[in-house]
Amino acid sequence: MLNRVYCTYFDHNYLSRGLALYHSLQRHAPGARLWVLCLSEACHRILVSLDLPGLVAVRLEDFEAADPELAAIRPTRSIVEYYFTCSPAWILHVREREPDAEWVTYLDGDLYFFASPEPVYSELVSATVAIIPHRYAPNLTRRRVFGTYNVGWVGVRNDPDGIAVIKWWRERCIEWCHDHVDGDRYADQGYLDSFSRLSARVKAVENVGANLAPWNIANYRIDFRNSQVMIDATHPLIFFHFQGLRTGLRWFIFNSHRIFGAPFSRNTREHIYRPYVDELLAIEKITDPMLEVQETRPQARSHTIKSRVRNLGLLAFQLLDIVAGRAFLVLRGTAY
């Protein structure tokens, strides 16, 4: 197998998701290295203690020491905005320390592989950068203001053209990277729309089995055949983006499909979400006792009136999901 390296970042609140990503990648791309930028000391301590093969854990402070220009803008960003700002710099950091890598690919921490990523790479023979479209469902056209492409998968070939694109991205994120839309800019993600102007070798991944997600699943029929999740009966599911998955109301795990107006079929529940939820719970049985602080709430983006109204709407959706059987009930570490 060619030398393909991956990188991601997360803190201890998302530890089980990050480890689920790691294990799924090892199953379907054996021997792949995953570099993790640890956004909390607890995250770094636990990953080092687990000593997993092919996982390279890096402290945030060590990463910042290697990029003082990036670290200097931290006071000007919210926590989430600063993490977004780190994305291209983190790719470059890993690339510099993996000089023999053919590709370095950033993955969001809430991705999960169901099959080999090889079909994606088969599209990239002449590419220097790989990005992936949102493929929004028709009811979500208003979300296009957040960008054509999703940051969930951003790959760079280890050549001058690819590196130049990611360096441009890093410079733009240092200039501006905020958690709101400003013209054609949005966080780290809006800049991806400009990549094709920087190089003719930027490739938008076409395989619909890559980055299936709540915002695009309504475009397709989901089947389960011969132990594989199939999309429109033609494309095996490669990886799913579990954006918006969260625990709530003490005993439940919720998805974000209702927020996106997306269907949630039995095949989706049993053959996409259940394997992921079961793996999260199995990982948490190991990692939760290792946490010194048991509060594992994700970082809040804001506490504005708008966010409080949004949270009330989310609560209503959660109650509907319980009634409709979309939520998983978790009792004694088992999901029902």
Image (cartoon, rainbow, N blue to C red):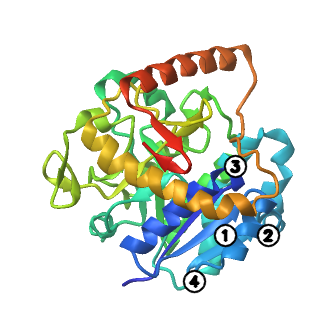
Identify the residue under disc 2.
66
| Crowd rating for badge 1 (residues with CA inside 10 Å; few <14, some 14–19, many 20+) | some
- Amino acid type, residue under disc 3 in the picture: Tyr
Q: Residue at x 39, y 49 (%)?
A: 274
Label 3 vs label 2: CA separation? 16 Å
Identify the residue under disc 4.
99
Cβ–Cβ under 8 Å for marks 2 and 4: no
The residue sitting at the left extreme is: 233
Identify the residue under disc 1.
93
Q: Residue at x 64, y 66 (%)?
A: 36
Instruction: In this rendered view, identify the residue nearer to me: 148 or 308.
Output: 308
- Amino acid type, residue under disc 4 in the picture: Pro
| Badge 1 or badge 4: first in the primary sequence | 1
| Badge 3 or badge 2: first in the primary sequence | 2
| Crowd rating for badge 4 (residues with CA inside 10 Å; few <14, some 14–19, many 20+) | few
Q: Which mark is on residue 83?
A: 3
> SS of the residue at dot 1?
helix
Label 1 vs label 4: CA separation? 11 Å
| Badge 4 or badge 3: first in the primary sequence | 3
Cβ–Cβ under 8 Å for marks 3 and 2: no
Cβ–Cβ under 8 Å for marks 1 and 2: yes
| Badge 3 or badge 1: first in the primary sequence | 3
Q: Is residue 168 visible?
A: no
Q: Is residue 101 visible?
A: yes
x then y, percent, for residue 330: 52, 42
Label 1 vs label 2: CA separation? 8 Å
x then y, percent, for residue 217: 31, 37
- Amino acid type, residue under disc 2 in the picture: Ala
